[in-house]
Amino acid sequence: MTTPQEKTVSKVMEEIEKKQLHPIPRWKFVLKYFALWFLGGISVVSGAIAFSLTLLFIFNDDWVEYRLLHGSLLNAVFKMFPFVWAITFILFLLAAHFAIRHTKNGYRFRLWSIVGFNVALSLILGSVLYFTGISHWVDRGLGKSIPGYFPVETMREMMWFHPEEGRIAGEILEMEDGTNSFILQDPSGKEWLVIESSPENGVFPDLHADMTVGAVGEEISEGEFQAQRIKILPSPEKRGLRDGSGQGAGHTDGQGRVKEIQRGVRNNK
Amino acid sequence: MDPKKTEATDEELVSLSVEKKEYFAILMERYASRLFRYVIRISGVTKEEAEDLVQEVFIKAYLNLNDFDTSLRFSSWIYRIAHHQTISAYRKRQVRPEGNRIDVEENVLHQIASDEDIARNLDREIQAQVIREAIERLDEPTREILVLRYFEEKDYAEIADILQEPAGTVATHLYRAKKKLRILLEEKSKS
């Protein structure tokens, strides 16, 4: 009489024989674990890039200015915090966790240790990417290749270029010593006479021709702008935004850039 | 088959089974009864269903022999497959517990009783009945961790490898499982 144990063994052996079963080749498992580690690695690197772009937006936007322009810090945070990059960073963290958890020994680590390790690695790598300028390069590259994506510099100009809301930005073309006014050319090529309304209060920085500035005030007549505050902005040439002709990088003309900026503003709203 | 091979370790037999399936039969002989009991204990399926499940476990193990992690014990690996297969069948087929699946053996009784004051104070026969009923009332993950610890006599590291959880998590789950069991045993002793 056969025991249940013997019955099970013979049934399994019969099935192996009948269905001609063979162990799955080792290379398939090697490939599977390689894919998981690769996914984990890619996720950590992508998370780091997302984190570096989060840093780029946080450190390069004019938070203080935006707060002054819009009143509330909460509003400024809501409008300017790079939620997309922050969420992308979290998604890549989850992907890395999934990948590592499914490797052979991934289960031996606690959730917090895997997540903590991934976060630490992404933060270190992300900071390196930010401080070496690679995140700027990636940001600009994305701006050129993804329609509707606005690099941090574009976002800054979008924030400043709202004549109807009392904000203009551009390059100082002429400035005479001893006067309180200058000629400013905005990104569309339009020239503005900017009059400093109260230079004696000391809020205006030292200005000279070729500087890129943003001005807050009001349009008093066509082409004339009375500025209450002026802020020096990083030069577009230094930021690689414009070519030698003063046009936006990656754009055919200044007007196109203005249109893009305006479209971006509408989308943002 | 070389009769000496039957004295080979499980791990050696895994390597041999990849080349020659007859060696896999030796592994199956070693584990069939244990897995059969384990499957019944954690799921409460009928004997027939348990037999089918154990067969599926062996087929799956055979197909995945090349994925066997040599840093593990074979017993942990095969129990892990049995755990997944049983849980999966339990969910897919909605198998229903049959009852009386927990066979409380003397050594198990001693183990649990030594941990739980309540059980220790009871008469031996009543102890067996009370513990059996209490364990059967536990939810599936709680029951499984107790089964692995007391019935299959696995240590924390092995349980961690079987359930694929960190050893610290296993310790926490086992602590909670024992706490739940203690509450049930207290209720039983009062009634």
Image (spheres, coloured by chain):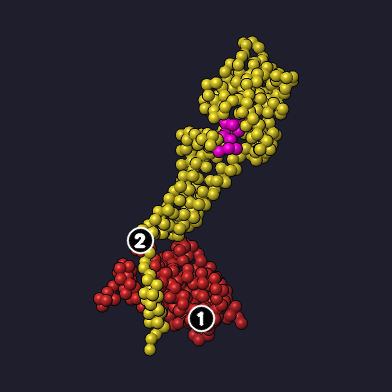
Chain colours: A yellow, B red
Residue lying at the far bottom in this picture: please name it: A1
Magenta segment boundaries in residue numbering: A146-158
**Residue toward you, B56 or B168:** B56
Q: Secondary structure at mark 1?
A: loop
* Distance between the alpha carbons at the discs numbered 2 and 1: 36 Å
Which amino acid does the dot numbered 1 rest on?
Answer: Thr
Q: Is residue A116 above or below residue B154?
A: above
Q: Residue at x 73, y 19 (%)?
A: A222
The N terminus of chain A, quarter of image: bottom left
The C terminus of chain A, quarter of image: top right
Which amino acid does the dot numbered 2 rest on?
Answer: Arg
**Residue toward you, A266 or B50:** A266
Q: Residue at x 49, y 55 (%)?
A: A98
Residue B134 seen in the figure: no
Q: Is residue B47 above or below residue B84?
A: below
Q: Is residue B52 above or below residue A172?
A: below
**Residue A208 placement, left or right of A197:** left
Q: Secondary structure at mark 2?
A: helix
Q: Which residue lies under the disc numbered 2?
A: A26
Q: Point out the frontmost of discs 2 and 1.
A: 2
Q: Is residue A155 magenta?
A: yes
Circle count: 2
Q: Is residue B158 above or below residue A40?
A: below
**Which of the labelled discs sits on residue B46, or is there none?**
1
Q: Is residue B90 magenta?
A: no
Residue A155 seen in the figure: yes
**Whole-percent x and y of residue B19?**
30, 68
Pointer 1 local density, CA inside 10 Å: few below 14, some 14–19, many at least 20: some
**Whole-percent x and y of residue B54?**
44, 75
Q: Residue at x 59, y 40 (%)?
A: A82
